[in-house]
Amino acid sequence: MRIALLGGSFDPIHEGHLRIAKTALAKLPIDEVWFLPCKDAPLKKGQQVAFHHRCAMVKLAIAPYRKMKLCTLEGELDGVSYTIRTIKELKKRFPHDTFSFLIGDDQAAQFDKWKDSAQLKQEACFYVFSRHEDGQLPTGMKRVPMQLISVSSTEIRNGEKKWALPKTVRRYIGSNGLYVINWVKASMSEKRFQHSVSVAEVCVRLAHAHHLDEHVAWCMGIAHDICKQMPFEKAKIWMIHHMPSHLQENRAIWHGYIGADYAKRFLYMEDKRIISAIYHHVLGDGASPYAIILYVADKLDPARGYDSSEQLLLCEKSLSLGLARVKQEQQEYLRKKGVIS
């Protein structure tokens, strides 16, 4: 069998990767494309997501395509993911197959930095996918012109171009809380972000005390203020289109409603416990223990600058008693601010 290897971090995989694989299958003398996630890339720093998550996302993305496969070999090998070691191991395991590599212009430009690059070209053919039909390539490589999608995994991690994520990958990201901390940080001021991190930590603490899901608690905490700093006109349009029944409520409350909707649409969080907690976190009118935890964690956040240790200890012992005390104090605060009468 003739196998083309498409290696990378896939942190996360996106439609640009899939287009390269589809083009390779259509244009090149190959039978299958194997996606080869690297465990520890020598020329990349700062990978954020664990190898098993990246493999799971690849598997979901390629599921509709019978000629695309996932190869987890580099996860089995110790140390840095050097391509020369990988190709030798593949040839040892699959002696009757032939292998080639699919790479981009950026990888071709760095090829001389790859370990044993000269020997690598003896081991396998390299196809370079490029927008251009000319330009210099390392000796022996073959150019494959194509219309590449202008997107990178880095952009997606930074909260941009999320449209390039396959739907199944979006769901996986949302259910596992991947990249959400980056996306939250990109949407708010540093001060608001630090508040969100602190609230998430308090949520986890209270979830642990009451034997609840700590991952759910962290997700709702980190995302609860995702729309707190949305400009008023944009928030108003959102309310008109998506939740007009709440439009007449005080605008200070809106970010809870919008945030719940945003978390579902753009952070891909489908867990009803998370969405409901964010929805109710401003007024604290949610009945679930998660909604109660988020409400009190938001109000008792130590980063707000006052000593809330006594109230937090009470919440650890009893959510109902803690909620009653926090609500009483919060009602007094909201009346002073004119949010409620």
Image (cartoon, helix red, strand yellow):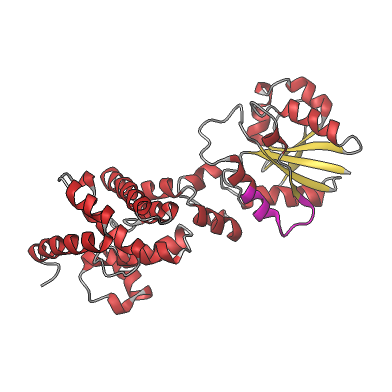
Q: Residue at x 81, y 34 (%)?
A: 90
Spot occupied by residue 288 in the image (x, y as percentages of width and height)? 35, 67
- Determine which quarter of the picture holds residue 302: top left
Q: Residue at x 14, y 64 (%)?
A: 328
Q: Residue at x 53, y 42 (%)?
A: 49
- Please count the marks in the image: 0
Does residue 234 show up?
Answer: no
Membership of 231 in magenta stretch = no
- Who is closer to the viewer here, 338 or 186? 338
Magenta-colored span: 56-68
Left or right: residue 136 versus residue 323 is right
1 lies above or below 172: above
Left or right: residue 180 versus residue 287 is right
Spot occupied by residue 108 in the image (x, y as percentages of width and height)? 68, 31
Quadrant where the N terminus lies? top right
Spot occupied by residue 123 in the image (x, y as percentages of width and height)? 83, 27
Task: Work out which residue is located at the far bottom of the displayed protein and give it.
Answer: 245
Left or right: residue 174 versus residue 56 is left
Spot occupied by residue 232 in the image (x, y as percentages of width and height)? 26, 63
- Determine which quarter of the picture holds residue 65: bottom right
Task: Work out which residue is located at the far front of the displayed protein and give it.
Answer: 317
Does residue 304 show up?
Answer: yes
Membership of 66 in magenta stretch = yes
- Who is closer to the viewer here, 134 or 75? 75
- Who is closer to the viewer here, 53 or 150? 53
9 lies above or below 271: above
Quadrant where the C terminus lies? bottom left
Task: Work out which residue is located at the far right of the displayed protein and give it.
Answer: 96
